[in-house]
Image (cartoon, helix red, strand yellow):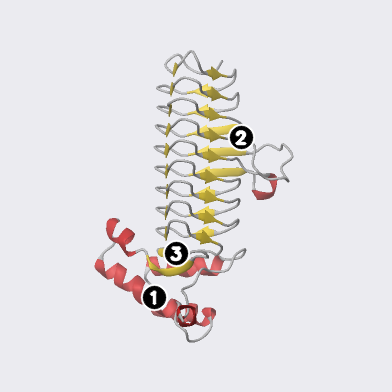
């Protein structure tokens, strides 16, 4: 056994030979830790937690009952190839959360950043890449191959389509069905989701200045104006806001899109 004596393991739990448990790991009753699992310092499995496969959990992450991490991906193309799930430090993973490792077709890895919070019954599918400080509310469903930027908040019951990108500091409303990419700092609502402006409340909470928010608002209005094509508007905004980092993040995000269309505001016709 590779786990250290300073780890605390309840006698009613199973830790398979080969598992690596760092100092300060606490494993409560009725947990199962697989042979290829790595738990970094201070990880806590409260009870009834299963961690399987080639899964690494970062330091001081807490995992609540009935979470299932690292079992084979829910992808019919998966044939048992080596793949990994990596979860960052200081995360909170609440009851019933499920996370799957990657697949050969998606790069072989699912990655979750630091300081993330996943509330009850949220799901992270295979080959997803999630940034730091992300919050998934209850019952969020993230399909395979999605990319979620730093500080994103996703409301309860939202469903995110395969290959969708959500830019940093975006907000997704509860029960939203997100089929298209959501720009950084954007707010998407509804089924099917539409872009409802910028995540102003989130920007204020994260200490963006009044000037920065004003600049983002002005750039947003230009980007999603009725005149011209999106490419023409991208060029116009790029020329006008050359030195503004936050605006350039949105422009880069839009230019990098490949798999999905962009989530856009409702047109005036949609309200009639």
Which mark, by number, is residue 143? none
> Is tag 1's residue or tag 3's residue first in the polypeptide sequence?
3
Earlier residue among tags 2 and 3: 2
Residue at 59 percent across and 65 percent down: it is 260
**In the rendered image, which quarter is residue 197 located in?**
bottom left
Q: Do residues under tags 1 and 2 come within 8 Å of each other at their CB atoms?
A: no
SS for dot 2: loop
Q: Nearer the viewer, residue 16 or 124?
A: 124
Circle 3 SS class: strand
Q: Is 99 placed left or right of 29 in the picture?
A: right
Mark 1 or 2: in front is 2
Residue 152: x %, y % from top left: 42, 54
Q: Residues within 10 Å of mark 3 (few under 14, many from 20)?
A: many
Front of the two marks 1 and 3: 3
- Return the residue nearer the eye: 272 or 62: 272
Task: Report, in whole angstroms, how far the alpha carbon at label 1 lies from the one at label 2.
Answer: 43 Å
Label at residue 188: 3
Considering every residue shown, the one lying at the far left of the view is 210
214 vs 173, left or right, is: left
Q: Which x, y percent locates residue 105?
A: 69, 49
- Describe the element under mark 1 as helix, strand or loop: helix
Instruction: Determine crowd level at label 2: few under 14, some 14-19, many 20+ residues with C-alpha closer than 10 A.
Output: some
Q: Which mark is residue 219?
A: 1
Residue identifier under label 2: 71
Q: Is residue 141 above or below residue 222?
A: above
How far is mark 1 from mark 3, CA to CA? 17 Å
User: Which sits earlier in the primary sequence, circle 1 or circle 2?
Assistant: 2
Q: Give the distance between the C-alpha atoms of the residues marked 2 and 3, in whole angstroms.
A: 31 Å
**Figure quadrant of the N terminus:** top right
* Most foreground residue, 237 or 199: 199
Residue 26, x across and y down, in percent: 42, 22
């Amino acid at each position: 056994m590779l786990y250290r004596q300073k780890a605390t393991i309840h006698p009613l739990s199973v830790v398979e030979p080969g598992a690596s448990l760092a100092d300060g790991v606490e494993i409560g009753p009725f947990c199962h830790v697989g042979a290829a699992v790595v738990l970094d310092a201070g990880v806590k499995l409260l009870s009834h937690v299963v961690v399987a496969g080639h899964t690494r959990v970062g330091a001081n992450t807490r995992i609540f009952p009935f979470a299932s991490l690292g079992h084979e991906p829910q992808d019919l193309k998966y044939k048992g190839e080596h793949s990994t799930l990596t979860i960052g430090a200081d995360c909170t993973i609440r009851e019933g959360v499920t996370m799957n490792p990657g697949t050969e077709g998606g790069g072989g890895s699912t990655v979750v950043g630091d300081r993330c919070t996943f509330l009850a019954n949220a799901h992270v599918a295979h080959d997803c890449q999630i940034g730091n400080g992300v919050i998934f509310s209850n019952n969020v469903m993230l399909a395979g191959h999605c990319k979620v930027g730093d500080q994103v908040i996703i409301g309860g019951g939202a469903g995110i389509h395969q290959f969708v990108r959500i830019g940093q500091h975006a907000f997704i409303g509860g029960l939203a069905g997100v089929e298209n990419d959501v720009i950084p700092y954007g707010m998407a609502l509804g089924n099917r989701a539409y872009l409802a402006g910028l995540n102003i409340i989130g920007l204020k909470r994260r200490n963006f200045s009044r000037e920065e928010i004003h600049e983002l608002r002005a750039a947003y209005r230009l980007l999603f104006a009725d005149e011209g094509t999106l490419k023409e508007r991208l060029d116009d905004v790029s020329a006008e806001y050359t030195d503004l980092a936050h605006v350039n993040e949105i422009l880069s995000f839009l230019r990098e899109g490949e798999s999905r269309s962009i989530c856009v505001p409702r047109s005036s016709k949609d309200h009639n």
